[in-house]
Amino acid sequence: MKESTFIIRSNTQIARSVYKMELCGDIFDITRPGQFVNIKLEGFFLRRPISVCDAEDGLLTVIYKVVGNGTSKMSKMNCGDTLDLLTGLGNGYDLSKSGEYPLLIGGGVGVPPLYMLCKRLISENKRPSVILGFNSSDEIILAEDFKSLGVDVKVTTADGSAGIKGFVTDAMDGISYSYFYTCGPMPMFRAIEKKALTSGQFSFEERMGCGFGACMGCSCKTKYGYKRICRDGPVLEREEIVW
Amino acid sequence: MVNTNVTLCKIKIDNPVIPASGTFGYGYEFAQLYDINCLGTFSFKGTTREPRFGNPTPRIAECPSGMLNAVGLQNPGVDKVIDTELPKLKKCFNKPVMANVSGFSVDDYAYTCEKLDKEEQIGWLEVNISCPNVHGGGMSFGTDPSSAAQVTRAVKSVTGKPVIIKLSPNVSDIALIARACEEAGADGISLINTLLGMRIDLKTKKPLLANITGGYSGPAIFPVALSMVYRVYEAVKIPIIGMGGVSCAEDVIEMMLAGATAVQVGAMNLVDPFACQKIINSLPAAMEKYNINNLNDIIGGAHRWEKT
């Protein structure tokens, strides 16, 4: 974990209530996809934990949804503004278990961390396929970016306004996969837990205090004892999760 | 060269800055960030007789200049703390540590303290009779002078280490409780624990915390804490550890002027994991700025002034 100052290089809206922010700074501590950063915003006491979408060549990309006053303030920040970040938080996804054909399943703003994961898997000569689920076409993010990586991408929307009408689990039929990685809302997780045929990893979200394991604000029970989502997670393995 | 040493219940510490219980784990995780031997000491995570998971989540909510927590004393229990946490701490911290203890009965407190009394690295026992987040738990002891005294006596009878009683601000007269603890043999008083509070989610109309209410901490409560430290200083002769919203070296000095011998830093550790290190590093310059050579000279310094 590191505390350092980042400079905003871009901050643009990419879908309904969803923004993409690129930041320049020290990304050395971001070692695994699925980790997150904790952002200090002026006027707010607690930091905002946001998952890492990509970190390469000194550039950090985060994609966030405006859900409250903090993210609303973030969305109004400008190019050249600076932010204080804690980086390298969370365990991130374990790539060693992926097998040859891992399946990446993202829902809504759970999609971004899968992008860096997908890049890393490809660089390790794996052949991932991707399912991205959204409520509606105006919420779709990163679909083209994934396609640019050369992977098979299926998009689902609950209202049928784009791609396959339905949920991510409706797109799982017909895909053979060696393992899965997912990030998204709890109802999606429960559906995947019912449907998935292999082992896999789930990245969880919880309200956090510190983000680095000190306050016990985000604890959960697992089959192998208590874990802190921020420090021992956010990624948990299917076999340890208590549903 | 200014002097930042203070003596807390007969144990000399290099500076008065102490991370507060529940914001610093058992220390070793912060030791990966900086050398925690720069601290005066620290108060480790509230420890109980049995392991506790604590409250359901969400346990955290934000407030203006602060936060609410309702963690509910999650800890692995005293046996595991002794067997696994303290050995890990010993590798990265070579000073006496403050053991924070909670309980649900007088017997619980005595049981846990008796076990911790045998641990060499523990310098002080800080007895929390003020956690607002456990039902029927510590809080009831902290709101009644005779219960507070009862816990104090029980703990004193099982340990030779200095006993510091941690008080709740959620009472009508905190000085009364402090005095009861002093009369029962307490070696020190620490205050304040968090203030009872809550938030409601406007979208769902539900309380933000699963526990409904939680404890308010952070810079917002600093003036409340300061006034209570000031008041308790006039009520007791034993040393006071002041806490509540301390976030910088100037706050440390202000707390000491109100009557604190040492100062704990809580919520700030969660926002800035380097907060205590930064406060310690900036303390000498802050002392020089306000013409303070020796921190011992300013303890209770604000009491010289009459109300006008």
Image: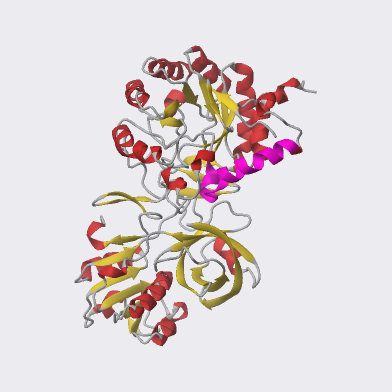
Q: Quadrant of residue A76?
A: bottom right
Please name whichever residue, B30 or A158, is drawn nearer the observer in this view of the structure. Answer: B30
Q: Looking at the image, which is closer to me, A79 or A66? A: A79
Residue at the top extreme, as displayed: B183
Residue B38 in percent (x, y) is at 54, 39
The reply to whether residue B247 is in sight is no
Count of residue discs? 0
Which residue sits at x=48%, y=65%? A28
Q: Quadrant of the C terminus of chain A?
A: bottom left
Residue reaching furthest to the right: B308
Q: x%, y% of residue B283?
A: 65, 39
Which segment is the magenta one? B266-288
Query: Is residue A9 visible to us here?
Result: yes
Please identify the quarter of the rendering in which residue B308 is found.
top right
The residue lying furthest to the left in this view is A197
The quarter holding residue B303 reads top right
B292 relative to B9 in the view: left or right: right
Main SS type for the magenta part? helix
Residue A94: image x %, image y %?
A: 31, 66
- Residue closest to the eye, A11 or A5: A5
The image position of residue A144, as x and y in percent, is 43, 85
Left or right: A55, with B172 as reference point: left
Q: How did the renderer colour the structure?
A: secondary structure
Q: Is residue A74 magenta?
A: no
Query: What residue is at 54 percent from the left and 52 percent from the top?
Result: A46
Which residue is pictured at 24% across the width and 66% down the height?
A193
Where B12 sits versus A133, above or below? Answer: above
Question: Magenta stretch: residue B287 in it?
Answer: yes
Is residue A13 placed above or below B266 in the rendered structure?
below
Q: Is residue B234 above or below residue B137?
A: above
